[in-house]
Amino acid sequence: MDNKKYPAFKGLNKFFFVSCLLVFSVGLFSSCGSRIGWGLVLWSVKGSELKSGLVVPVYLKSNITKQYVVGLEDKNERFEVPLWQIDYQKSKKAAREKAKAMGELASIYFIAERDGLPVRESPSNNANARRVYRMREGEMVKALARVEGEAVYTGGEKLPGDWYLVLAKDGTRGYVFSYALSLFDESQSQIPEQEEEPALDAKSVNLVFAKTWRPAWYGSMLGNNEVDLDYFSLRFGLFGDALNRQLRVELPASSNVFRYSAVEQKDDWLVFAGSRLRIKPEGTTSLLVSWGASVPTEEPDDAAGWAGTDTYLRFTYVDSETIRDAIRREEARRGTALREFFSAAEKAGARPDAAGVLRFSSPFAGTMEFWPSGSYSWKDSLFLPAGFTPPSNDAESPQKGSVVFGLRLSENLASQWQGGFSLYPDDTGRRTDYAYALKGGGLQLVPLELSRPGSPSDTTKAKLGTTSLAIRPAQ
């Protein structure tokens, strides 16, 4: 930013009077008076004599605008300078010691020769040295000190260069290896003009953290009134934690925590430095979110995110009470579907035992039992082809778990089968879907391929065929 000058004589007393008045009335400035301390200029101030390495008097510090008001010794000029550009000290001696420590680096800057060059929290390139800043190609940082650090290798060869403590233009400090940097000496020529990074869209950042965002299929499920509770829950979504500088993405098949050091603007995207996370707001009710190696050119399908390999998807805003209401309605619908199955089985000739358990069996498919509480068991099914029964850790013992009725079938499957259910073994919890029909004195089953969120089941596992289990009398 261009720094404002204040005339030395005319209006100077008035300036200090107004500043002091503000302190008294609203606490705008932390102090006022002739001088509050001394500072070392870390980065030269454009259009002024305030060069890096210079010790200057500090008159005011604004806690709201994040600026110091500094001057030049023996000159009655005042400059507003961002806090990060000044190393504040209480005494002139301390400021001079800081300047002496900077030494020959006072006029030295570095320019990145490639994009994505990391600035780290310690002088090391290993995974434990967290990245605190990401340099763009052609971006400049200020050298503050040369330090000892770990050697850097590529392809087994040691790279030439040194580690430096540097300062970025947003005030971030960290360590960078000089191999991919070009050196610029301000004492030899004027600092080159830097292409300004797009201003950070504060409204977009606030939007990301102000809401809990849900996968786009939530909207599809609600719109079609086809909620699948395996993919529709309060635990899935994009959850922001600005205080701890992290965002968490919870999905049915994956969980990711992204810790970031800063938020940067790159075109329409918010880039969370120190992680692969990128977010692009679409109005106020939708976000595009990516954490892959790059952002695909095509926009994601609304069902993206249910597979563990998905790293690019759309999130929408759905309030929590709407989600809770939809879950309650779906649980009630599933309970009704369970009771309807028992009723249909009795009409087909099945008779539950005293505990209300229905049994079906065959020499080939074994014995299946269904409890009115929503449990099942399946034993002696060894003659069925592999993959027909749900995956289990112990194929020889009776399989037990939960059964959920009410699986939605496509029009084609619904014309051939009476309904559908899902089995969840206790030992693995891995879901397997089936279409069923109660006819011919028994239960006919065909396993189904899992459908995408918000879509009805429409494909059978054709290679596995179908099986029939006869109704067994009550015991």
Image (tube, rainbow, N blue to C red):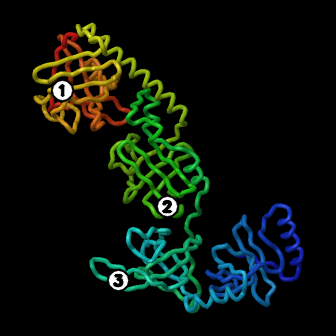
**Callout 1: SS:** strand
**Callout 2: SS:** loop
The residue tagged 3 is 159
Amino acid type at mark 1: Lys
Cα distance between the residues tagged 3 and 1? 64 Å
Looking at the rendering, which quadrant does residue 446 occupy? top left
Which residue corresponds to the image point at 47% horizontal and 35% vertical from the top-left? 219
Q: Nearer the viewer, mark 2 or mark 1?
A: 1
The residue tagged 1 is 379
Q: Earlier in the sequence, mark 2 or mark 1?
A: 2
Q: Nearer the viewer, residue 467 or 81?
A: 467
Q: Nearer the viewer, residue 157 or 149?
A: 149
Amino acid type at mark 3: Leu
**Mark 3 Cα-neighbour bin, 10 Å: few <14, some 14–19, many ≥20:** some
Q: Nearer the viewer, mark 3 or mark 1?
A: 1
Which residue corresponds to the image point at 71% horizontal and 71% vertical from the top-left? 67
Q: Nearer the viewer, residue 233 or 356?
A: 356
Cα distance between the residues tagged 2 and 1? 51 Å
Task: Give me the disc on residue 19.
Answer: none
